[in-house]
Image (tube, rainbow, N blue to C red):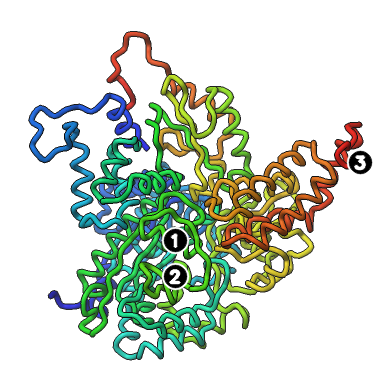
Amino acid sequence: MAAPIDLHEVAQREHEARSRYPWRIKACGSTACLSAGSASTISALEQTIETSDLALDAVVIPTGCMGLCSRGPLVRVLRRGGDETMYQEVNEDVAIEIVRSHIRNHEPVEESVLDAEIPFFAAQERIVLANGGIIDPDRIEGYVAHGGYVALQKAITEMTSEEVVEEVRASGLRGRGGAGYPTGSKWGLLAKSEGDEKYVVANGDEGDPGAYMDRTVMEDDPHRLIEGIAIAAYATGASKAYIYVRAEYPRAVERLDRAIRVARRNRLLGRRILDTEFSLDVEVRIGAGAFVCGEETALLASIEGRRGTPRLRPPYPTERGLWGKPTMINNVETLANIPAIVNKGAEWFSSIGTPSSPGTKVFALAGDLVNIGLIEVPMGITLRTIIEDVGGGIPDGGTFKAAQTGGPSGGCIPAEFLDTPVDYDSLRQLGSIMGSGGLIVMDDTQRMPDVAKFFMEFCMDESCGKCVPCRAGTVQIHSLLERICAGEGTFTDLRHLEQLCATVRDTSLCGLGQSAPNPVLSTLQYFGKEYEDLITIQTVAGVKEVADA
Amino acid sequence: MTEDTSSAARARRGRDKPADASADTHPSGDDRFAVIDKHLKRGRYAQDQLIETLHIAQDVFGYLDDGILIYVARALRLPPSMVYGVATFYQLFTFDPPGEHTCTVCTGTACFVKGANDIVAAVAAAYDVPSGETTEDGLLTLKTARCLGSCGLAPVVLLDGEVKAREGADLILAALETMVVPEPVGAAAEGGES
C-alpha cells in the first residue's frame, strides 16, 4: 500500500512551483465560459506565450468558474507580488493582446479590463466556491495548496465521529437542495441507525432549469465534494458512498471520476485512509434524464438501476435506503460546506448568514439582468441587493417584474417583497422556496400566466406517473393554463385552476407533485389580475361564457 | 454531439460484419456488442448497472432498439419488461436513430425568458418536424434540452454540438439552411457529416 499523501509537503511544493513564474494567467475553463469559446482563448494564450519566448515568465492555468458568466470567457492575470487584473470577453484576439501588451510590456489591455471591485464580486462571500477561478480542477495539488483535505485529516485523526456530527449540528447548516432540513440532525440519524453497512449519497441530480450550482462544484472543485463526503461517511459510520450525477453533466462525471482515482492513490479514499482505521469507497452513478430523481427515494431507486419513482416515507432512507440499508442523502452544495465547517468551526459558520439559516447560498442568476452568472452570498441578504447590486439591475432600462426562485417547485416574487431577506423561512412565507438556487429575474415584458404554464409543462413532462394527483393533475392544470393563456379561459376555469392546484399540492406522493402548483399559486396570488385580464378580454370580445351560466 | 452523429451514421449503414468474427462475438457478428460485454464484465454483471449499461449501449449504437434491450436484459438476467420499463422511463434514452444533423434548443427558464419557444416553433415550422423527432428525410432532428447551464448566453442553441449563443430564430434558421443541405441525387450514402 502506498504511503498516504503528506498534505503539508504537497502544499509547500505547490506554492514554490507557483512562485517560479512572475505571471500567472488563470483562464476560466468551466462549462459556461467554454460555451463562450474559452477553449480557444486558453490555447491562444498558451501559443502566444510559447511563440513570444515568455515560457519562463508566464504560465496559463485553466480554472473553474469565476462567476460572471455573461461576460465570459473570463481571464485573470496575476503578477507575482499580488497585483491582479481581470479581463472579460477574452476571445483569441484579446488573448494574444493580453500576452503581447500586458505580460511583455506591462501595459494592461484597458478596453477589456473588468473592474473586480464592482458589487457583483464585492457583495459575495465564497465558501463553497472559494476555489472558483483559482485552482485547476484536475490537479489535487491545487486543492491541497488551498487547504484541501486538512479538514478530513483533522476529523479522522483528532475528532471522534460524534464530535464531527456535533460540530455540524452546532453550525446550523441546512440542506442546500431546497427543503432546508438541518444537516446535523440527518447525520445524527444515520450515525445512530443500526446496520453493518451504511451509505452516504451525494445528490448531484440538479434538475431545476437555470440552476448550475452543483455542477460547478462537481466540475470545478471535485475534491471539495469528495472531502465533504469522506467527512460525512466518517461521522456517520458509512463505508460506501455514491455521487449521483445528472447524465447531462459529462464533464462533472469525468472530473469526479479522475478526482476519485487520484484521491484513492493518495490514500484519501479507499482502505485505511491516511493510515487510520477509516475506510471509504466512492462511486459515481449517472442518471439518465429524470427530474424526479432529485427526490431522495426516487434517486435511490435510480442508483439501484430501476425506474426513478419515489416511494412513501417513512421509513426514511436513514432507516431503510439503498438495498434496504441505512442511507443518508445530502445535496452536493451541502457537502461542499463541510470541510470549511470542520476547519474553522461551527461558531465561525453560524456567524455568517442569519440565525435560522446560517452560512451562504450559491445562486445561479439568470434572466433579464445585466450580470448573469453564479454567485455565493451570505444568507439574509435581500433580494434587492442580489438583483440591483450583484445582478446589476434590469438591462436596457427595463422594469423589474418578478424574481423566480426554486425553479418548477418555487414561486414568483413581486417587486413589493424585494426587501425580503433571502433565507429558507422568509421565502416560504412568500409562497416560494429557496430551492436549489436558481434565481431568474423577469422584466415587465413577461406575462406571468405564460411563466406558470412553462413550469407546469415542465412538471407535467417530468411527473413520474406513480401517483394520480401528480400524473393527472399536472395535465389538467396545464390544459387549463393553455386555455387561459390563449384567451379562451373562463372564470370557472380560473376557479378550477385554484382548486386543482390545492388538491395536487395536498395529495401528491412526493415533493415534485406537492410543489408543482407553486408557480401557478404564487403568480395567482401576486399577479392574479393578469389571469383575470386574459379572461375579461375574451368576455368583452363577445364570446359569452356559456359554461359559466 | 458530433460523436452521436457518427455513431448514428454507422447505425444507419447497418451492422458491418467484421470478416474475421471470433467465436465470442455477438451472433450477428456486430463487434459493437463487445463494448457492452466489456462494460458488463467490469461491473460483474451486477443488475444495478442497468442504467450505465444502457448509456454505453446508446453511445455505441446511437440509439436503443429491441434487439439491444433484449441483449442487455439477458446479460443482466433481468426481465425484458423491466429493461424496457427503465429505458423508456428516462428521457435521455432514444429508440430511433437520430438524424444526420441535430438542432438542440435549450428550453431552460433563462432561455424561455429570452424566447427559446419561438426558436423551437420556427424550426419546427420551417422543417415540418415536431420537437423531439426527425425529419422524414432523416436530415434533421429537432430536440429540446432542459437546461444547458449556460444561462449567460441565453437563448442557447446547439447545432450539431456547436454552441449558438444569444441568437434569435432568424439567425438560427439561417445557420440551419447552410448546415442542412439535402444530398444531391446520386451522391454516395457515405458522404455524410462525419
Label 3 or label 1, whichever lies nearer to me, is 3
The amino acid type found where label 1 is placed reads: Leu
**Location of residue A488 by image quarter:** top right
Residue located 81% across and 52% down the image = A528
The amino acid type found where label 2 is placed reads: Ile
N-terminal of the two: label 3 or label 2? 2
Q: Nearer the viewer, residue B183 or B152?
A: B183
Residue located 49% across and 22% down the image = B177
* SS at mark 2 in the image: strand
- Tell if the residue under mark 3 belongs to the same chain as the one under mark 2: yes
The amino acid type found where label 3 is placed reads: Ala
Q: Position of residue B13 (x, y in %)?
A: 27, 24
Relative horizontal placement of residue A410, taking residue B132 as reference (left or right): right
Residue located 32% across and 37% down the image = B3
* SS at mark 1 in the image: helix
N-terminal of the two: label 1 or label 2? 1
Report the residue marked by disc 1: A299
* SS at mark 3 in the image: loop
Q: Marks 3/1: CA distance? A: 48 Å
**Considering only vertical position in the picture, is A67 above or below B117?**
below
Q: Is residue A107 visible?
A: no
Relative horizontal placement of residue A233, taking residue B157 as reference (left or right): left
- Tell if the residue under mark 3 belongs to the same chain as the one under mark 1: yes
Report the residue marked by disc 3: A549
**Location of residue A447 by image quarter:** top right
Q: Position of residue A149 (x, y in %)?
A: 32, 77
Which of the image's four quarters has the C terminus of chain A? Answer: top right
Q: Residues within 10 Å of mark 2 (few under 14, many from 20)?
A: many
Labels 1 and 2 touching (C-beta < 8 A)? yes
The chain identifier of the residue carrying mark 3 reads A
N-terminal of the two: label 3 or label 1? 1
Report the residue marked by disc 2: A329
